Image: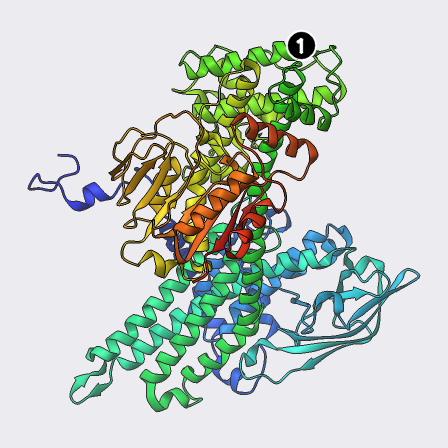
Amino acid sequence: MTGRGATGRAHAADVMNRAAPGNHTLDAEIERIRREARRRFGSFVLDIANPGSHFRNKECRPLDNRVFEQAGELGLMGFSLPTEIGGEGRDKLAWGVVVEEIARLSRDPGFAVLLDISVEITELILSSGTPELIETYVPDLVAGRRFGVQGAYESRDPYDYHSTARLEGDVWVLNGAKRFLAGARFADLFVLFLRDEASNDMLAFLVEKDDPGVTPVHMDTMGMHTMGLGQVILDNVRLPAARLVWRADALSELNTYARIRRTMSACGVLGALDGVIENCVEALNPRKRGGRRVLEYPNVERSVGEMRMLLQSARASVYRALDGTRSPDRDPYFDEYATVAKHHASECALRVGQLVMSLQGGEAYMSAFPWERFMRDILGLISGQGSQEMLLLQLGQRTIVGLEGKRVREEAAERAVSKLADGWWALHASAHGDGEEFADAVAAVVSAAGLDASEADGRGAVAALLERAHALVAAVRAGRPPEALPPGPEGLFEGRLAKLAAGAWGLLVCGVANETGLLARLLEPCTVREAAEDLLPPGLAEGLLDALVAASVVGRDGEGRYVADEGLERVLIGGPRASAFAARLRRALDGGARLRNGKPVAGRESLTGCGGEAAPLADVLVNSLLGRLEGLPELLDRPGAQVGCAAGDGGRSAVELARHIPFVPVLALEPEPVAMGTTEGDGEVRIRTDDGTGSTGAGFAAGDFKGDFKGDFKEGDRLALAWLPAAGLSGPEQLRAAVTAAMEALLPGGWLVLPCPLPPKRPLGAAAAHLDLALAGGRTPADGEVEGALTAAGLGHVRTAWDDTALGVRLIAARRPA
C-alpha cells in the first residue's frame, strides 16, 4: 500500500515529505563531496601535512614549499581550476567543501587557507587574459612548484595607498610596502595592488620574490605561526610592462577576489570548528568527576550542544554562500552572503573557543595542548578578509544603498506609469472641442502639451484612436474582450503628437492589463500562453504584452518571457498600495470617458486621497505617523474618543480608518445614507449624513450619493483625530469653514489631518492632474492655502507630515492646542 506502513495507516512523514523521486538535497551533495575529499586527500593531510605541525607552530616556522608541490601532484591545487590548464573544473561549492574537510583533518588551520590563496592567485592571473603571464606562471602554480599570494592591505582606502607605481618609458617603478600577507615569507610571487601616481587609478602587478628591490620581512603575530605571515617592501622595483596584471580598475578585480576569499576563509573556520569540537569531546571522554563521567553532567552536555548548534549555524550560512557562487545573477563585486558567512562563522568560532576553554579547565591555557592555539589562530583568521567591524560596516552600507535603491526604483516605476497619463489627458483635451465645461483645465493641458487646439489636423485620427480605446475598455469590463488588440497610434502621427499618442496608448494597455489581472501575473516571467490562460484571448494578451513592452512597463528576460518592471511589484502584489495604483489607473480611464461623453461626476471616491487611495493613507497614518503626531495615541485610548472622517466618498475612507484603528469608533460624514453591510475587522463606523440621519454598524458597503457635500463636523464630537481630504472642498471659503468645524470638534490636543493633492512638477503632468481632479469634482488648493486655513482656525504644529510624489498625495497635519 503506497505511502503506508505495515499496519496500513498513514504516517506523518508520508504526508509531510513531498520531495520528488530522485531529488537530491544540498546536504546530500555536500556529504558526497566530503567523502570524496577524505578518500582522495585525507591520507595526504594526515600523513604529510600534519606531522611536525605542533613544533612548527612553536618555533614559528612556516610550512615547507614541498608540501604544496605534493598537493599539486595529487590534483589538490587544480581541483577547482579550469580543465584547459590541467585542472578538474569543479565549482566553488565543491572546492569550499574540500577546504573545509582539509581544515577539519589538519592540525594546522592555516594549511587549508594557504591552499585556497594560491588557487585564487592562479585564477587572478588567468583573469588577466595576458598570454605571457599565464604561460609563465600558471603551470607551476597548478603543479604546486610555485606559491603565490596577493597583497592589498595598507589599512587605508585603496585610492589613498602609499604604495605607488610610476611609468618611466616602458618600465613600471614600484615603491611602498604591503603588510599582513599570508605566505609572504615563503611565497615565490605576489600579486600586489598599487596606486598609479599619474591617474590615481588602482593597478595590479605580478612581482617575484627575486626581483631587485623586493624584500619579504617576517611579522610577529599572536597566532597562525605556520602561515608565514609577513610584509613585502618595494624599493624602486622595476618591472616590464608585461607584469601589469590589470591595466585599469584593479579595484573591481580585488573586490571579486575578496568576495570568494571571504567564503573560503569561512570554510576554513568551519573545518577548524568541527575538528576542535571533536577533539574536545574525545579529550573529555575518559575524564571522571565524583565517580561520574564528565560527559554525563548536564552542564557539559549543554555546552557540547551549544558548540554543535554554533557549528551547524555557521555551516548553514557558509553553505548558502557556497551555493550562491553557482548563480549567474550573483553580484560580481560584493557577495552579501559571503560577508555574512565570514562574520558569522568567526563569531561562532570565538564562542566555541570560549566553551572549550571552560570545559578543558587549566589545560586550555597550556601551549602543550591544542586549545589555546585554536583561540589564537581563530583570532588570526578573523582579521583576514576584513575585520568583523568592517564586515558589518559594509553590510550596513549595502543594506542602506539597496533599500534606498529599491525605493527609488519603485517610485520611478510608478511615476513612469503616471507619466503615460500625460499623453492620455493631452489627447482627450485636444479632441474635446470648444465646450465650456472644464474649458480652463482643458486649455491648460493643451498648452502644456505643446499642442495647438485650433488646428483640426489630426483631430479626426485622435478621436478615432480614443474611440477604439474606450470601446476596448467597455468590452473588457463587460466580459466580452476582443480577440485582438485594436490598432494603436503607430504611424498615425508625427512629432510631439506621436509621442503623446504613444503614452496615451501605454496608459490604456496598462489600465486594461491591470483590471484584467494580466499585469499582476507578470510578477513572474510568463509566455503569452501562460499570461493569457483563463484571463484573455491569446491574441489580445499578446497585443497587450507587446504594447506594455513598448511602454517600458514590461520587459523580457533572457528566454524571451514577459516580466513586469521589478519596481511595480509593490503595486501588483496586493494590499493598500495596489488598490491605490488600480484606483489611479481606473480614474484616468473613466475621467477620459467623462470628458468625451459629458457624463456627470460618479462620486467623490475618485478624488485624490479618497476611495481606493484611502487604504495606503490610513496605513501610513497608523504605521508611520502615529508616533509623530504628539499625544495622539493617548487621546485615542481615552474613553469616548472618536475618529471623524469627512471624505464623503461613500464610506470608503471611513472603512479604511476603522480597519486600521479598531476599537475606536469612526464617525463618517456622508451627504446621505449609505447601504449598511459588514466588513471584516473590529472597527465600528457611525454614519451622520447632511440631513441629520445616522446609523451604526461594524462596517458598510459604500453607496452612491448626489448633491453638494459640506462635510461639517459638530462641536462636541469628541474627536481625537479628524480626517478631511482637501480635494473635496470646493473653494477657500468651504475649506476654512470645514477646518474651523473640525477644530471645534477636536478634543484639546487632537489632530486634524488633510490629504491634499501633490501634482507632479512637470508642467504637463501638473495640468493633467488638475484636469483629472476637476473631472472628479475636486480641485487642487493653491500653495499655502491649506496651511493658511489651519493657522487662521487657531490650530498649531502645522506641517506636511508625509508626502509621496508617486502617489501624488501629501498629508498636512495640525493640532488643536491643549
- Image quarter for residue 349? bottom left
Quadrant of the snapshot with the C terminus:
bottom left
Quadrant of the snapshot with the N terminus:
top left
Residue at 65% x, 31% y: name it. 767
- Image quarter for residue 616? top left
Residue at 34% x, 32% y: name it. 691
Is 717 positioned to the left or the right of 630 in the image? left
Residue 142 seen in the current view: no
SS of the residue under disc 1: helix
Is 568 positioned to the left or the right of 651 in the image? right
Front position in the image: 550 or 303: 550
How far across and down, in percent of the image, does residue 746 sit? 40, 53
- Image quarter for residue 506? top right
Q: Residue furthest right?
A: 169
Front position in the image: 236 or 632: 632
Residue at 84% x, 60% y: name it. 199
Examine the rendered structure and indicate whether residue 422 appears above or below residue 19: above
Examine the rendered structure and indicate whether residue 498 appears above or below residue 224: above
Identified by mark 1, the residue type is Ala
Is 756 positioned to the left or the right of 239 in the image? left
Residue 720 seen in the current view: yes
Q: Which residue is mark 1?
A: 461
How far across and down, in percent of the image, does residue 51 sit? 47, 78
Examine the rendered structure and indicate whether residue 799 appears above or below residue 163: above
